[in-house]
Amino acid sequence: MARLDKLWRSVDGPGVPPQLDSRRVKARVNAALDADQAERKIYMKQKLRTALIAVAAVAALTGSAFAATANWNGLSNWFKGNPAPVQEYVDSTVRSVSDENYTLTVEGCVADEHSAYLTVTITALSDEAKEFLWDDHFIDIDTFDVFPVLSSGKKPSSWTGPGYYDLDGSTENTRRFAISISDFPDSTTMLRVRCGYMEEGKQVEVPLTPAPSKTVNIGASGSGTPSVISPIVMDDDTLTISKITLTPFTCHFYGSSSANLDPNIRLRMADGAILTQSQVMDGTDGSFNEATHQWEYHYRFKEIQDLDGIASIIVFDMEYPLDGSKPTPVAHDASLDPITVTRMEPLSERSGYSIAVRELTEKLGGVCTWDPATGDVTCVYRGVSIVLHAGRGTALVDGETVELPNAPAEQGGVLAADWQVFEDAWGLDGFVQRETTRDSKNTTVEYFDFYIIP
Amino acid sequence: MNDKKLAQKLKQGSRSALNRAMDAYTRYLSAVAWNAMGPAATPEDVEEVVSDAFLALWSRRDSLQPEQGLKSWLAAVARNKAVDRLRAAPPPPLPLDEAGGAGGSTPEDELERRMFADALRRAVENLPPPDDQLVLRFYYEDEPVKDIARDLGLSVTAAKSRLCRARRKLKEILIKGGLADGTVG
């Protein structure tokens, strides 16, 4: 479906949007050009060449679908850590479908009740298809479609489209991708996977065996944190959470927010340690569930979680045990509250704002020391040390060398560094707060300090 | 095939490159033309303008500069052709338009669709930046999301997330204006 059609449908436009069919335009233009005999000769020569390529491609067809079994290790494309807790839910069946241009192969899949992770290979079967496989335009939002099929046989009213990225192991005529899809309803029994450049109806069906989950009812409101999408929060903005579901792959919460707020969830592990949302979860996808009239937000864990290793969920200063026992108040831990840190100038023309290193470390409750003999600046937080040196394009994170996008630099007596190294090493979330104002002529974006969520 | 390659092949006289260009840019140019001509323009008007733009592309292929791509060139030509067409034969006021729409729809349906399209386009143009550019370039101009995200300084994930929210915002705006759910207010 064309993008404008999708937009039209999403805003409940009447019928279909007024737009042209490119086939009609092509027919009209080609008819006008073919009326000229000199033009026609060139065109027919080219058509013949295309037809010969198509015949060769059809001869190379290997059949419509087949299945085989192999070991699949695609979990590492999306998660760090030990896959053992979910190994029994991995589907390593290889499934394929072909048309005259491409073969689409799903090498394996693993899922929970709302998200799935797949490895997909596209193999080009003709020269033209091979050329397009590596064309800049091959990767687009419609390159892959993954449709959830519900137990009722129907398609859900909405779900977040697939996210994907290129994997190693591609060849001249084969391209491999890691694909994830999230926010599908828990009654999903199967995914239909198709490549947008293949014939309609050519799709691979992947039945799902979801990994187990645990749900706790929350039914409470409170303050949330701003997000990069909605970076400024007003005092009266609130977040309501009705329930939270944890799976080995995701934290899924149901509720509503007046300003796209993120929750500030913490997990108490079975060993007593408390891990914050920034430490264990990545960014979010959200969608509105028309059946329940609730927003559903979906956070992927950075590492696969063993649910038996999580004792409770802490949110709005209440602790909700996963075993279903009664929630209890928990003392507010101010050391985990968000902080703001001075925004420093970009370290190169193409980079974003940098951050004040000592201020960040000390406001988080860490320790920052400068060695005058070596010029090294060592920052320690959450037991992880980061060693920086002005003018050097690498850092040492717990002794291991890490490339930096830009070398740290002194700005007015303050060491400034790119934010990413702290985000990755210390498990933080953060962004530069900004406010956009617009009048009839101009748009102005005002940038403020970094907002850091420990 | 990217824009630069398409332009190079066009310069070499490739008709399949012209067909690829028509596949790639018909929707974009129809949006450009409709925007220039207003909701009263009929599909036939727009088809003629867009076809003329592609015929101009073919006839002027020798002077193309591949490194500048095709998109902005085609958009400028389509806009000029639309203005020429308006000057030569301005479309009649909407209520008098008897042209049926896609799928054998009635003139009333067609009127409703075109008014909705006009309201949607205006709502998109009034979104706060960068969402206005994001939605226009993604939904109306069929640009790859990674290119738009790069130009707007967003990650691809953030761009997709903003697109999702912008769709909801547009629906809210159109509902407030009495236009969503297919009801022209």
Image (cartoon, helix red, strand yellow):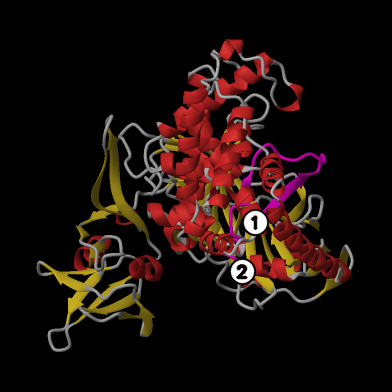
Is A447 rendered above or below residue A86?
Answer: above
The answer to which of A450 and A301 lies nearer the viewer is A450
Q: Which mark is residue A4?
A: none
Mark 2 or mark 1: whose residue is earlier in sequence: 2
Question: Which-is-in-front pick, marks 2 and 1?
Answer: 2
Looking at the image, residue A385 sits to the left or right of residue B1; the answer is left
- According to the picture, the residue beneath numbered tag 1 turns out to be A143
Secondary element under disc 2, as helix, strand or loop, is loop
Is residue A150 a member of the stretch shown in magenta? yes
Quarter holding the C terminus of chain A is bottom left
Amino acid type at mark 1: Thr
| Residue located at (76% from left, 76% from top) | A71
Is A119 rendered above or below residue A204?
Answer: below
- Given contact means CB atoms under 8 Å apart, are the residues at marks 2 and 1 in contact? no
Quarter holding the N terminus of chain A is top right
| Residue located at (62% from left, 38% from top) | A6
Amino acid type at mark 2: Trp
- According to the picture, the residue beneath numbered tag 2 turns out to be A134
x, y percentage for residue A286? 54, 44
Is B38 rendered above or below residue A113?
Answer: above
Residue segment shown in magenta: A135-160
Residue lying furthest top in this view?
B96
| Residue located at (42% from left, 33% from top) | B125
